Image (cartoon, rainbow, N blue to C red):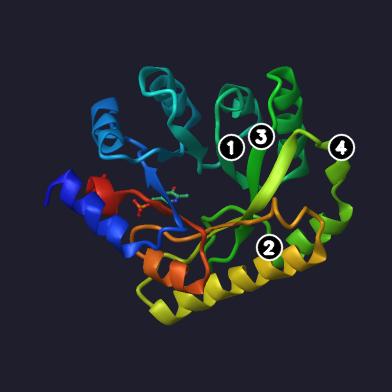
């Protein structure tokens, strides 16, 4: 199958109100440009250095999503242009994003990453830590950082029932946070979950944003 065929197949399987983020890590500028030419505008990258090199070389109306593990030292490199940072999991990162957002005269949108997988390798706050953060973190100290929702990754396994349970758990937590109104309801609207292998399950559980790499571009 060609890139165009894979892309239209993915597009057809995603409801129009769910944002498709094309994960382009390790992909060259030409491949990204080819997908852009097919109409795709939201792209996701994991590595700050790679994103820094690609961004100036590609169309300026691309909405870049940073979906990797962001270290404080790299915040300054992505804040000037990033559309959405998916993986915020600490006060220190919030403070650094605030600082760099002010320096560039921007307001930066972020998602709080929640740890839902039964794996050691995934980052994020546990549900208990998230609830504590809602109470304890100084949200008003970060006026240039808008928390738009939550992000999570399910366990990478074949047990569909477990993956579904993890997504449903995150969706329930997201609804709970919305009800608490720590963040304005019209701002806290995004739930980023689902990748190539589990996007269908994530969408069924209420995802508003899927991050799809290999199903569009092929194996990395
Ligand atoms: C790489 C990556 C994806 C995309 O994974 P695919 O299996 O290629 O669709 C999605 N989300 C995150 C956080 C990733 O690192």
Which residue is disc 3 drawn over?
A: 108
Residue 9 picture location, percent across and down: 23, 58
Q: Which residue is mark 1?
A: 70
On screen, residue 21 above or below 33:
below
Q: Nearer the viewer, residue 164 or 185?
A: 185
Cβ–Cβ under 8 Å for marks 4 and 1 = no
- Badge 1 crowding class, 10 Å Cα cut-off, few under 14, some 14 to 19, many 20 or more, is some
Disc 3 on helix, strand or loop?
A: strand
Residue 81 found in image quarter: top right
Q: State whether residue 116 is above or below residue 105.
A: below
Q: Considering depth in this image, is 58 or 15 the residue closer to the camera?
A: 15
Q: Residue at x 46, y 39 (%)?
A: 46
Q: Secondary structure at mark 4?
A: helix
* Residue in view at x 42 percent, y 18 percent: 56
Q: Which residue is mark 2?
A: 126
Q: Vertical placement of 185 versus 110: above or below?
A: below
Q: Considering only order in the chain, which callout, 4 or 3, is on the residue closer to the N terminus? A: 3
Q: Secondary structure at mark 1?
A: loop
Residue at the spot x=47%, y=66% of the render?
Answer: 155
Q: Residues within 10 Å of mark 3 (few under 14, many from 20)?
A: many
* Residue furthest bottom as drawn: 161
Give the SS element for disc 2: loop
């Amino acid at each position: 199958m060609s890139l165009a065929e894979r892309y239209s197949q993915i597009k057809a399987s995603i409801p129009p109100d769910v944002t498709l983020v094309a994960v382009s890590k390790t992909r060259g500028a030409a491949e990204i440009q080819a997908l852009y030419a097919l109409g795709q505008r939201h792209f996701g990258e994991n590595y700050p250095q790679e994103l820094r090199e690609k961004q100036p070389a590609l169309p300026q109306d691309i909405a870049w999503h940073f979906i990797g593990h962001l270290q404080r030292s790299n915040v300054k490199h992505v804040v000037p242009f990033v559309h959405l940072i998916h993986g915020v999991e600490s006060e220190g990162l919030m403070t650094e994003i605030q600082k760099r957002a002010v320096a560039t005269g921007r307001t930066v949108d972020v998602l709080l990453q929640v740890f839902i997988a039964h794996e050691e390798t995934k980052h994020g706050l546990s549900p208990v830590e998230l609830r504590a953060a809602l109470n304890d973190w100084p949200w008003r100290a970060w006026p240039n950082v808008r928390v738009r929702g939550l992000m999570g990754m399910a366990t990478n396994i074949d047990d569909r029932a477990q993956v579904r349970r993890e997504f449903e758990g995150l969706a329930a937590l997201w609804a709970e946070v919305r009800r608490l109104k720590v963040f304005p309801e019209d701002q806290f609207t995004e739930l980023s979950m689902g990748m190539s292998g589990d996007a269908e399950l994530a969408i069924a559980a209420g995802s508003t944003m899927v991050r799809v790499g290999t199903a569009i571009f092929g194996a990395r």
